Amino acid sequence: MINSYDFGLIVINGEEYISDVIVFPEKVIDKWWRKEGHKLYVEDLKEILKHEPKPEFLVIGTGYSGFLKILPEVKEALKSYGIELIAKPTKEACEVFNDILKSGKKVVGAFHLTC
C-alpha cells in the first residue's frame, strides 16, 4: 500500500523511498534505474516481465509533472504479455495503484518520483 507521495518521496507500507521504485505485492525494488532517465524502454521493465505470477495491471507513475515518456514498443510488449498499462502522473498513479490493490487484482507499480 502506498501511504503517500510528494516530489522525490514515496512512502510504501510505512517505509520512505527517495529514488524511483517498482512495487510488487510482496516486495519493493528501490533505485529503479532506466536506460534513459525520461524514456521508458521494454528493458527497463525486465523485473516486471519475468515476475510470476504476471500482473494484470502495470501502473506507471510518470513523475510529478508527467515527464516520463513511454515508448510505443513498451505498450506493445505489455499487451503481448496480457498486462494492462495505466500511465499517469505519479500522484494519480499512486491512487490508482492503491485502488487496484484493494480490489484484489494483481498489480505492479513503477514510479518515477521527480520531474
Image: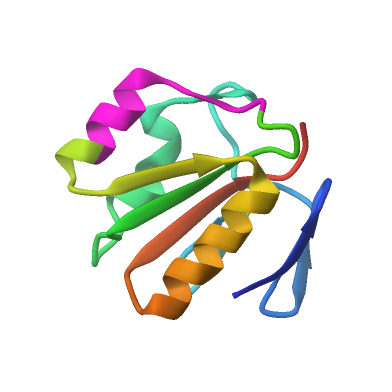
Magenta-drawn segment: 67-78
Would you identify the image quadrant in which residue 105 lies? bottom left
In the rendered image, the vertical position of residue 48 relative to residue 99, given as above or below: above
Let me know if residue 25 appears in the view.
no
Q: Where is residue 23 drawn, in percent x and y?
A: 53, 62
In the rendered image, the vertical position of residue 60 relative to residue 99, given as above or below: above
Q: Where is residue 53 drawn, in percent x and y?
A: 24, 67
Which residue is at the front of the view, 47 or 14?
14
Answer whether residue 73 is magenta in the image.
yes
Residue located 58% across and 21% down the image: 36
Asked whether, in this view, residue 70 is left or right of residue 13, the answer is: left
Would you identify the image quadrant in which residue 11 lies? bottom right
Quadrant (top left/top right/bottom left/bottom right) for the C terminus? top right
Answer whether residue 76 is magenta in the image.
yes
Residue located 56% across and 32% down the image: 34
Tally of marks: 0
Let me know if residue 74 appears in the view.
yes
Residue located 28% across and 52% down the image: 50
Asked whether, in this view, residue 1 is left or right of residue 11, the answer is: left
Q: Where is residue 55 drawn, in percent x and y?
A: 30, 60
Asked whether, in this view, residue 98 is left or right of residue 44, the answer is: right
Would you identify the image quadrant in which residue 22 lies? bottom right
Q: How is the image coloured?
A: rainbow
Quadrant (top left/top right/bottom left/bottom right) for the N terminus? bottom right
Residue located 60% across and 48% down the image: 111
Q: Where is residue 94 drawn, in percent x and y?
A: 61, 58
